[in-house]
Image: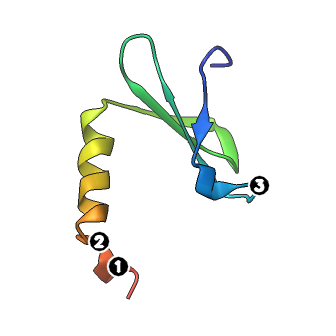
Amino acid sequence: MSDLDWQKSSYSSESVNCIYLAATPDRNIKLRESDDPDAIITTTPYKPRAFLRGVKAGEFDHLTA
């Protein structure tokens, strides 16, 4: 996995508990957390896109209330 270009949000700055994303040559998306970088989730680009749209639309706001 070291050949992947892992990226984190610029909003994370130098804090801990960051989520990193990387695109694979076969067009999948890899996700990992800074606390456990060996635990990697692989998904398609469509699922994170749908999740982010839901977050932006407020669909999960009730979970933080």
Q: Which mark is residue 48?
A: none
Q: Which of the two residues, 11 or 2, is positioned nearer the viewer here?
A: 11
Residue at 44% of width from left, 11% of height from top? 25
Dot 1 crowding, Cα within 10 Å, few <14, some 14–19, many 20+? few
Pinpoint residue 61: horizontal percent, then vertical percent: 31, 78
Q: Which dot, 2 or 3, sits closer to the camera? A: 3
Res 48 quadrant in image: top left
Quadrant of the image for the N terminus?
A: top right
Q: Are marks 1 and 2 in contact (CB under 8 Å)?
A: yes
Question: Where 11 sits versus 48, above or below?
Answer: below
Residue at 29% of width from left, 63% of height from top? 56
Q: Name the residue under label 1.
A: 63
Helix, strand, or loop for circle 2?
A: loop
Dot 3 crowding, Cα within 10 Å, few <14, some 14–19, many 20+? few
Q: Name the residue under label 3.
A: 14
In the drawing, does residue 38 fall left or right of residue 55?
right
Question: Where 8 sits versus 40, above or below?
Answer: below
- Tag 1: residue type? Leu
